[in-house]
Image: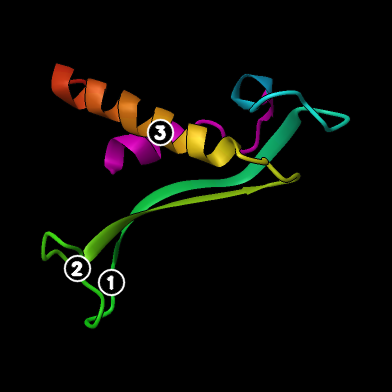
Amino acid sequence: VFTMNKMAKQAEGLELDYVGLSYGKVKTTTTLCTLSRAQVSLVKLNDDIQCRSGLNEAVCFEFVGDRFLRRMIRIMVSTLLSLAIQCVMKGYE
């Protein structure tokens, strides 16, 4: 979670082109977006909610931008997960 949050924070406040995360044909006038908040954190679940593993924690991905990132959030989350796993396995944390 620490590694993913560190990577996500690097995008905060920057106007970036998200065309690479687009799904299919781009239907908007611009693919530029500024994320005012990009955060990954560990949250505790309510006592009545529990994962199959028995844990009561979940990873929360929070993105706030100046436009709607249609379908891009799934790609952003999976990319963060993949990169974080690679970093941890190589000892880069």
Q: How many marks?
A: 3
Asked if the residue under mark 1 is in contact with the one under mark 2, i.e. CB atoms within 8 Å, the reply is yes
In this image, 87 relative to 35: left or right? left
In this image, 55 relative to 68: left or right? left
Determine the secondary structure under disc 1: loop
- Mark closer to the chain start, 2 or 1: 1
Q: Amino acid at mark 3?
A: Ser
Q: CA distance from mark 2 to mark 3?
A: 22 Å
Asked if the residue under mark 3 is in contact with the one under mark 1, i.e. CB atoms within 8 Å, the reply is no
Say if the magenta span includes residue 32: no
For the point 14% across and 64% down, which residue is it? Answer: 55
- Mark closer to the chain start, 2 or 3: 2
For the point 24% across and 28% down, which residue is it? Answer: 85
Residue pointed to by mark 3: 78
Determine the secondary structure under disc 3: helix
Residue pointed to by mark 1: 45
- Of all residues, the one furthest to the left in this rendering is 54
Determine the secondary structure under disc 2: loop
Q: Amino acid at mark 2?
A: Asn
Say if the magenta span includes residue 3: yes
For the point 28% across and 44% down, which residue is it? Answer: 1
In this image, 78 relative to 90: left or right? right
Question: Which of the image's four quarters has the C terminus?
Answer: top left
Q: Residues within 10 Å of mark 1 (few under 14, many from 20)?
A: few
On the image, the x and y values in percent for residue 42 come to 29, 56
- Residue 9 appears in the figure: no
| Position above or below: 6 against 91 | below
Q: CA distance from mark 1 to mark 3?
A: 22 Å
Residue pointed to by mark 2: 56
Q: Amino acid at mark 1?
A: Leu
Q: Residues within 10 Å of mark 3 (few under 14, many from 20)?
A: few
The part of the chain drawn in magenta is 1-18
